[in-house]
Image (cartoon, rainbow, N blue to C red):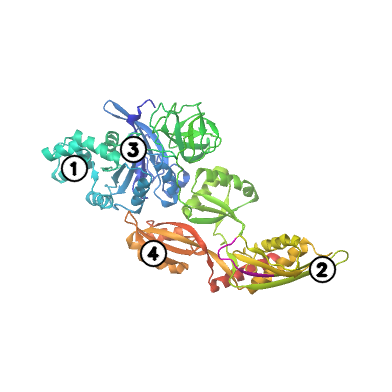
Amino acid sequence: MAIPVSNVRNFAIFGHSGSGKTALTDAIAFKLGLNDRMGLTTNGSSVSDTSDEEKVRKISIFSVPFSATHKIGGDEYRINFIDTPGAPDFFGQVRGAVCAADFAVITVDAVSGVQVGTRRAWHICKSYNLSSVAFVITGMDKENADFAAALGSIRDAFGVNCVPVTAPIGGKICNILDIGELPSELEEMKTALSEAAAETDEELMNKYFEEGELSSAEIRQGLSAGISGGSVYPIYTVLPIKGDGVTEFLDSVCRLLPAPGKREFTDVEGNALSADPAAPVVAQVWKTAVDSFMGQLNYIRVFSGTITPGMTLQNNDNGGKETIGSMILMIGKKQIAVASAGPGDIVALPKLKNTKTGDTLAAVNNGTVMKPIDYPQPVCFMAVTAKTQADEDKLSTGIKRLLDSDPTLKFEKDIATKEGVLKGLGDVHLDVAVALMRTQSNVNVNLSVPKVPYREAVTSLGDGHYKHKKQSGGRGQYGDVYMKIEPNPDNDPNWFLDEIVGGAIPGNFLPAIKKGIEETMLAGPLAGYPVQNIKAHIYDGSYHDVDSSEVAFKIAASRAFREAMKNAKPVLLEPIWTLKISIPDTFMGAISGDMPHKRGRVLGMETDEDGVQVITAEAPLAEIFKYAAELRSMTGGQGTFTMEYSRYDIVPSNVAQKIIAEAAKNRTEEEE
C-alpha cells in the first residue's frame, strides 16, 4: 500500500449481461497474478463469480472488488477494480460500484455491439458524474465478430470522441500508439486519436494544424487530459480467454486514465474532498456482504486520509464510533490482510458494530457526510411465509440480515392482507434473496404471489341507523345512532362530523361513536378490506340516562356505519401503479399491445437521452406482480422498468364480483 496516490488506478467494469465483464475480470486477475489460472464462468472457476448461486445461474450477482500491483518499466501502480453484475435484477450492486470508482470500463460484445445494458451503464455513470469512461470490445474470437461494426456502434451511440487505442492488427491486439508503421486501415484510427488529443490543448491543436501530426507522447498527453475531463473515451480490444490485449489494456489504463483526485467527490454540502493521504479520513461503505466465517463485511472506498488497524472512526450517519480491528482485501474467496488504506483504495472491514451500506466513516471530530447512494426502487413483490415454526422463529433475523446486505430489498408487513411482503428488482433477485437467507441464516421460506391490498369506498350519500338495546337483568345497554356517510375524495382529515342538535346524544359518547366507526372501517362490508375516503355525519340518536354507555354507542355506531355503507353504493378499490418501461425500438408494438391484457393503458411514449424507447403506462397491481419475468421473456432480457404507486381506482364490476365472491367463500371456510 506504499504506492503514491498518483500511481493508483481505481475502476469498475460495467456492461450488458453477457458482454464479457466477468471474463475480462478473470483475465485481468490472472494477468496481475491474483489467480494461478485463467478463471472461467462455464466451469465455475471464475475468481469473481464464487457464490453457489452465481455458479449455478452462470451470471454475476454481486459486485466484487480486487486489488493488485502492475509494473510498467520502473514504475509500480496499484490497480483497484470492481466486477459488477449486468442483469437488471442486481443493478443495485452497480449503484454502489459507481460511487466507489474513479473511472468506468464498459464492455461491448463484438457480435452484439451496443445493447440496452451498455446504454444503462453509460447513463448511470453520467448521472453520478463519473465522466471518465473507457470501452472494451470483447468477443473478437466469436463467430460473426466484427470489430468495425462494434466500433461503429459505440461511436454512433456515444459520439465520435470514442477513439480506439488498441485494435486487432494482424491477428494480434496492439496499441496503435506503439506501432511506427501502421497498416493503412488503422491510419484513420491514429488520425482520430491525434484529433481527439489535439482538441484538449491549444498548443497541441496549433502544432497539429501546423505539422499535421503529433508524437505518441503528445497524443498520450492530450488523451489523458481529455479522458480525465470526460471529453474523450478510449476504446480497447481484449480477448479475455486467450489473454490477448490484457497487458496493453492495463498499460494504457496506468498511462492514460485518471488517478484518485481527478474525479471530484463531494459531501452532502457540496464540499470537494482532497485525495490526500495526510488529510483527515473520509470513507464510505459502498457494499455490505455476509461472510459465512467472518460475519458482516463492510466494503469501503477511501476518499481522503489513511486508515490503519486500531484506528477509531466515527460513523457520521448514526453518530456511533467504530474501532477498526483489521482490514482485508477479498480476492475471490482469499483474504489478504493489509496494514493501511489510502485514497482510491477499497478494503473490507469486518465486525463493525453498527455500520451499513451508504454510511460515512470519518476521523473523529470530522463531520463530513457523503451523499447517500441512490438505489432503484423495487418492482417485484412476493409474499414470504416460513416453512416451519422453527423457521418462523428465525425469520425476522434472517430478513434483517438480508436487508442489511442489500439496500434494494424491502420488507413490510401489510396490515390489510396480514402478509409479509419481500420486494426486490425482479423475480431472480427475490429467488437469490431466499437462497441467501437459507445459507446465511438457515431460514427456509416459501414465496407466493401476494394478496392485493384492496380498499373499499362509497360513491354516493348513504343513510344508516342502528339502535342497540339490550336488557338482561341489572343495568342494560342502550345506544341509538343515526348517520350519513359520503365520499371524501380529498381525504379531508376532518372526516368525522358532529351534527347533533338538542343534546340527542351527549358529547361524551362521541369519541366512542368515532372509535366504533374506525374499527369497522378496518374490514368493510363488501369483501372485508379497509374502508377509505369517507365522511361520516352523526346527525341524530337517543340515549338512556342509566343504560347508555360508551360500549353501547360504539356497537350502535358500528352497525349504523355498515348500513350506511350498503346504502351509499360501495365499491372495491385497487392500487394503480405507473410504469416506465425502457426497451429497444423493435419491442414497442409488443409491449404497448400487451398493456390492455393487463387492464392497463399506455399514457405516452418517448425517446430518452440514450436513444432508448420509454413507454409510460399504468396498470393495476394485481396484474403486474410477475411483470419483471414477463418483460424479460418478451424482450429477451433487453427491457427494464420502474414503477411507483399512483392511486387507488375503482375495480371493474366483473372483476370485483369475483373478488367479493372469493372473500365470502374464505369467510365461510374460516367460520366452519
Q: Looking at the picture, how far across and down is residue 449, in whole percent? A: 54, 59
What residue does disc 2 label?
470
Label 3 or label 4, whichever lies nearer to me, is 4
- Report whether 581 appears left or right of 572: left
Find the distance from the CA under tag 1 to the CA under tag 2: 96 Å
Residue plotted at (58% across, 66% down): 488
> In terms of depth relative to the viewer, which is nearer, 145 or 658?
658
- Label 4 amino acid? Gly
Residue that carries the numbered disc 3 in the rendered image = 28
Q: Is 491 contained in the magenta span?
A: yes
Q: Quadrant of residue 546?
A: bottom right
Kindly identify the amino acid type of the residue bearing the numbered disc 2: Lys
Report the magenta residues as a range.
Answer: 483-492
- Between marks 1 and 3, how big is the CA–CA gap? 30 Å
In reply to whether residue 129 is colored magenta, the answer given is no
**Is 404 positioned to the left or the right of 193 in the image?**
right
* Mark-to-mark CA distance, 4 and 1: 41 Å
Label located before the other in sequence (4 or 2): 2
Badge 1: residue crowd in 10 Å (few <14, some 14–19, many ≥20): many
Residue positioned 65% across, 66% down in the render? 536
Relative vertical location of residue 233 with respect to residue 153 in this rendering, above or below: above
Please tell me which of labels 1 and 2 falls first in the chain: 1
State which tag comes first along the sequence, 4 or 1.
1
Q: Secondary structure at mark 3?
A: helix
Q: Amino acid at mark 1?
A: Glu
The answer to which of marks 3 and 4 sits earlier in the sequence is: 3
Residue 604: numbered disc = 4
**Is residue 327 in sight in this rendering?**
yes
- Between circles 1 and 3, the one closer to the viewer is 1
**What residue is shown with label 1?**
195
